[in-house]
Image (cartoon, rainbow, N blue to C red):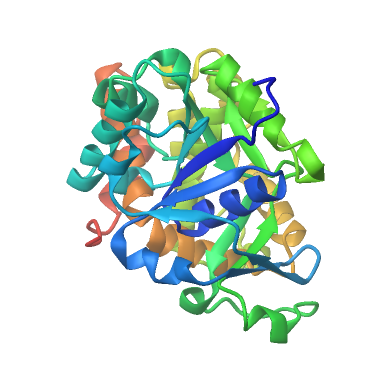
């Protein structure tokens, strides 16, 4: 990618992660095209407004194209495709069809795919379904908390510019110094994609090992425990709470799965109810004035609830196949509500 032509990226999905990723890439001078379902096309026919909790400013985003038919990917020449569907949506019938269309369009090409869907070993599933080469597909995610303002009803805290937030389609707050994070499962794709974010000061894309990247999501049992407690402020939670302890114990069990390599057991030794609560409390304070509990109640308690719960059930199945003892995860999964209708 040393030529001077404009880099082009197809962002699959125009929900929260898709729109913010598209905006960041556009700021870096990338030509962005969204592939969306028809009901999203109308929203994207006008500029999107993003409220930054960090700078308390309203960003306007309008430099993009839109397509609605996955079959239209054939014959295109995107440098990257960024898949931003949640794991449950990707594994549903429409997601499988989409995955096959991505494979048909870019198999045997130089196009790199950034898989932003979350699931236990979901990259292997995507490679099998798409037929793409391992060197083409790496995993990635946004480094920010982002939500749809009209739908979420997040409480306002001091510092929020309420008049600007009321005009926004999306609100976002950086959770890490990096605007985006990729893993090294396809090293050249990861390096080339990360390089885009340094252009024009648009942000930074960090690269983690596959194990480090995957271990981020081993915290899903703690999120599930928080859900079962009905999302209290973490400042009001005691680490001796039995449900919290169950979630942390389940987190440690997942960390010890073989998929996380030698990094997992080391991480599990640091996974105590007190340490995990302190980390989450630090995040709750760090993302203010965004309300961390309300954001997670909207996002993990609703928007990607099926994805999270599927991850936990898949982890339990994986553990049982490996002969691991996972009593805490088994007990936690038994308390989860039924899957929500899409």
- Work out which quarter of the rendered image holds the N terminus and state it: top right
Relative image position of residue 94 (x, y in whole percent)? 21, 47
In the rendered image, the quadrant that contains the C terminus is bottom left
Residue 145 locus on image (x, y percent): 61, 56
Direction from residue 161 to residue 268 in the image, left or right: left
- Name the residue located 64 percent from the left edge and 24 percent from the top edge: 192
Identify which residue is drawn at 38% across, 65% down: 41
Looking at the picture, tell me which residue is in the foreground, 27 or 180: 27
Rendered image quadrant of residue 141:
top right
Residue depicted at 56% across the width and 21% down the height: 189
Viewer-proximal residue among 219 and 175: 175
Instruction: Tell me which residue sits at (51%, 66%) in the image.
Output: 231
When asked about the image quadrant of residue 76, the answer is: top left
Q: Is residue 22 above or below residue 80?
A: below
Q: Is residue 206 visible?
A: no
Residue 269 vertical position relative to residue 89 in the rendered view, above or below:
above
Q: Is residue 327 left or right of residue 47?
A: left
């Amino acid at each position: 990618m040393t030529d001077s032509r404009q880099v082009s990226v197809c962002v699959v999905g125009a929900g929260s992660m898709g729109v913010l990723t598209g905006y960041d890439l556009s700021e870096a001078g990338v030509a962005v095209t969204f592939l969306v379902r028809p009901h999203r096309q109308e929203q994207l026919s006008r500029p999107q407004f993003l409220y930054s909790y960090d700078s308390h400013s309203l960003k306007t985003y309008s430099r993009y194209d839109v397509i609605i038919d996955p079959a239209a990917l054939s014959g295109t020449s995107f440098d990257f495709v960024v898949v931003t569907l949640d794991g449950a949506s990707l594994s549903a019938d429409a997601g499988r069809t989409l995955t096959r269309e991505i494979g048909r369009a870019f198999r045997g090409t130089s196009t790199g795919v950034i898989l932003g869907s979350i699931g236990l070993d979901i990259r292997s599933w995507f490679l099998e379904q798409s037929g793409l080469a391992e060197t083409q597909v790496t995993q990635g995610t946004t480094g920010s908390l982002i939500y749809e303002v009209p739908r979420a009803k997040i409480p306002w805290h001091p510092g929020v510019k309420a008049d600007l937030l009321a005009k926004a389609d999306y609100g976002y707050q950086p959770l890490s110094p990096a605007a985006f994070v990729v893993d090294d499962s396809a090293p050249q794709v990861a390096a080339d994609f990360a390089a885009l974010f340094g252009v024009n000061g648009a942000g930074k894309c960090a690269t983690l090992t596959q194990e480090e990247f995957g271990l981020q999501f081993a915290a899903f049992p703690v999120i599930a425990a928080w859900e079962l407690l009905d999302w209290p402020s973490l400042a009001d939670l005691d680490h001796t709470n039995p449900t919290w302890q169950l979630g942390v114990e389940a987190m440690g069990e997942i960390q010890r799965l073989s998929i996380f390599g030698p990094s997992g057991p080391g991480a599990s030794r640091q996974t105590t109810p007190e340490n995990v609560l302190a980390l989450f409390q630090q995040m709750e304070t760090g993302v203010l004035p965004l309300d961390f509990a309300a954001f997670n109640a909207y996002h993990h308690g609703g928007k990607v609830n099926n994805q999270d719960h599927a991850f936990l059930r898949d982890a339990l199945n994986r553990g049982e196949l490996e002969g691991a003892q996972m009593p805490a995860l088994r007990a936690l999964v038994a308390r989860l509500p039924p899957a929500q209708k899409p």
